[in-house]
Image (cartoon, helix red, strand yellow):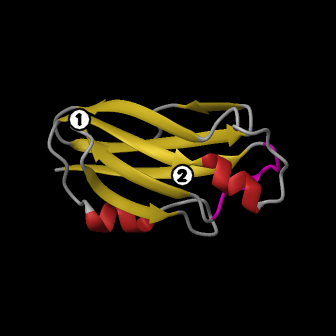
């Protein structure tokens, strides 16, 4: 069984990013899950909706410009970062945690625990 979780942290404001729209796509771009982060910046609906993923290539796509606009941040048009797409591969069974640390002009990610 392979599970996936995510967590979004707003590095501009130093807090979890709530109400960030995100989606999980397979290699072909088919949306497997669409949801929003909770008050802790997490998306528990992801693991509930997709409890077992096959090995392969996937992407998490986060609507970060919409989030920062909702926080009252003035962004250029077009925004430097509109959506952040993290493409990653899943191996055989295990848990994968893919956090996103984001500001309006930068982001980072890693395989967490």
Q: Quadrant of the C terminus?
A: top left
Task: Tell me which residue sits at (54%, 51%) in the image.
Answer: 7
Sequence-wise, the earlier of marks 2 and 1 is 2
Choose top left, top right, bottom left or bottom right for residue 32: bottom left
| Residue topped by disc 2 | 7
As drawn, the residue found furthest toward the front would be 77
Residue at coordinates 35% horizontally, 50% vertically from top-left? 24
Q: Residue at x 52, y 43 (%)?
A: 99
Q: Is 13 within the magenta?
A: yes
Q: State whether residue 94 is above or below residue 45.
A: above
Bin the neighbour count of mark 2 within 10 Å (Cα to Cα): few under 14, some 14-19, many 20 and up: many
Note whether 23 is above or below 59 in the view shown: below
Callout 2: SS: strand
Q: Nearer the viewer, residue 107 or 31?
A: 31
State the image coordinates of residue 12 (x, y, percent, origin top left).
Answer: 81, 44
Residue 34 position, x and y percent, is 38, 61
Which disc is residue 27 wearing? 1
User: Which residues fall within the magenta stretch?
Assistant: 12-18
Label 2 – label 1 distance at C-alpha: 21 Å
Q: Assess whether residue 80 is covered by the magenta stretch.
A: no
Q: Is residue 101 left or right of residue 77?
A: left
Which residue appears at 61% of the width and 41% of the height? 82
Q: Secondary structure at mark 1?
A: loop
């Amino acid at each position: 069984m392979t599970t996936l979780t995510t967590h979004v942290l707003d590095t501009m404001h130093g807090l979890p990013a709530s109400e960030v729209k995100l989606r999980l796509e397979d290699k072909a771009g088919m949306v497997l899950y669409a949801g929003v982060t909770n008050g802790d910046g997490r998306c528990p609906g992801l693991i509930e909706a997709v409890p077992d993923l096959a090995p392969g290539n996937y992407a998490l796509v986060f609507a970060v410009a919409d989030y920062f606009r909702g926080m009252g941040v003035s962004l250029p048009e077009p925004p430097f970062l509109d959506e952040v797409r993290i493409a990653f591969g899943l191996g055989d069974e295990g848990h994968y945690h893919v956090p996103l640390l984001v500001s309006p002009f930068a982001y980072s990610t890693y395989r967490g625990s």
